[in-house]
Amino acid sequence: MPLQRNGYLTAARAALEEITWVEATYHAVHNVLTHPGYAGAYTWGRSRQEKQITADGALRVRRKLVAQDDWQVLIKDHHAGYISWDTYQANQDRIGRNIRPVAHQPGTGAVREGCALLQGLAICGTCGRKLAVYYEGKHKATPGYYCNGTGQLVEGRGTRHLRAGGAGVDAAVTAAFLAALQPAALQACVAAAEQLEHGHDAALEQYRRQVEAARYTAGRAERRHAAVDPDNRLVARGLETAWEKALTGLAAAEAELARRQQARPKTLSQAERAAVLALGDDLGDDLGAVWDAPSTTDRDRKQLLRTLIEDVAVAVHRDDDNGHADLVVRWKGGALAELTVPVRPRTRQVLRTDEDTVELVRRLAVHYPDAKIAGILSRQHRLTARGLSFTASRVSSLRTNWKIPRYQPGDAGPAEGALLNVSAAARQLGIAPSTLLRWLDDGFVAGEQDTPGAPWRIRLAGELRGMLTPSAPAGWVPLGYATQALGISRQAVLQKVNRGQLRAVLTSTGRRKGQRIELPAPQKTLF
């Protein structure tokens, strides 16, 4: 048996020496920060299961965390922890503050990286909602605030009843914050600390009265239990249960009173008061330099503002020429400060499509539908006024805005000399579109484009119809034979045809449709 035990311990020790390092996950880090076992405490009953019947009759079981005061067992200093219990409690408070607050509920949430200093602090002066943050500018470096509440309906769309640039608002609140650290404001902070202390004492008195009432109830239950006849077991058991319930209520009231007493604000001594007031001599310049230092991040500035400011109510008033924003800063402790910040009139950005693009759409709308026009504009890399690529719907919106008529295909046949696309022209000539495109590429057929990237259009004139014959005259050869007979390149033959030096026709029937070239008659020599 000892050998087996020693062998088991040796195997366990060898297993512990094999440590595998992996990348930390969110769940693992969150568990380390929130589990009281890392703070040296033993707990039981931190969660409970709740069962409920859904609408379709199914049983649903879920696990729900309970508050710390409702834990069944909590033994502090049960074992050596990595952190102290006070540090653990401070971590829980900070995690609770960093949680994103529920809509329309108090709470600032975690400090973010943006340059909007009043993120989480600014509230709407009209409806009381927490203001949302937006950023604009080339590098998204200009903050602004707006309210999610809808002011009124304009043309079927809701308009914001508050939208203000954040640069002026942040600057005004920052100046008030730095000014609050001057000696006179520090005296007000000392007074606010005293007021907070007195208010806490008044609240503690209420909890002391609750403890006194619970102690009286427990004593009365004890006296009733002592006075009952032991032979009457049913009555004795009921009185014992009532006594235990009263003792539990007394313990809860005493624990709450002890917690409130530990959270009592620290009283400032005379030396501490003098030291705080002495900070005002050089604090203004030093703090201003630290505030504007490149090493101070926006997160640091937000943390500093939250140490003194509870929230900032913003109300914007505008007229035709200028406007102003009324700010109400509520400091920690309840003091208020009113500020007025001028705001520039809202300039509406006018979006306008390039004039050459509008004129091009006007010309193309005569011959093509919106989808075809969108393809032409995209091939030319043209963009809308908002920098988007053209689609059929955006071309339609552009036409509607500029009152450009829509393309209407005609029912009547094409007139003599009309311009037709390749498909329509090939259909009129009785040939395949691919054959017509090849003749167009060779230069035998003249084509036109309204703009680069637009489809080719061919003019149906008598000259083109005259060049098209069912069969070639006798002696006329294909283009390949002509190049061999003349001893020149294919491009040179086509150039001679275009200049009129050689005659050519287009055959539309037979197995070998295409160009037929009339070779010049051989010149007679003297010998």
Image: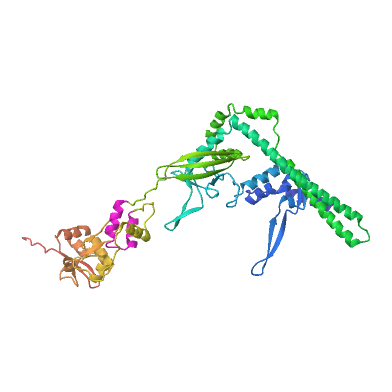
Left or right position of 67 against 340: right
Left or right position of 223 against 43: right
* Magenta region, residue range: 354-380
Above or below, 346 relative to 492: above
Image quadrant holding the C terminus, namely bottom left
The one of 304 and 492 positioned closer to us in this rendering: 304
The one of 448 and 92 positioned closer to us in this rendering: 92
- Whether residue 115 is visible to the viewer of this picture, yes or no, is no
Left or right position of 311 against 236: left
The quarter of the picture where residue 119 lies is top right
Q: How is the image coloured?
A: rainbow
* Residue 141 covered by magenta stretch: no
Q: Residue at x 27, y 65 (%)?
A: 422
Above or below, 36 relative to 156: above
Location of residue 200 in the rendering, given as x and y in whole percent from the top left corner: 70, 41
- Whether residue 414 is visible to the viewer of this picture, yes or no, is yes
The quarter of the picture where residue 54 lies is bottom right
Q: Residue at x 30, y 59 (%)?
A: 403
Location of residue 181 in the rendering, given as x and y in whole percent from the top left corner: 59, 32
* Residue 373 covered by magenta stretch: yes
Location of residue 142 in the rendering, given as x and y in whole percent from the top left corner: 47, 42
Above or below, 283 relative to 45: above
The one of 484 and 462 positioned closer to us in this rendering: 462
Image quadrant holding the N terminus, namely bottom right
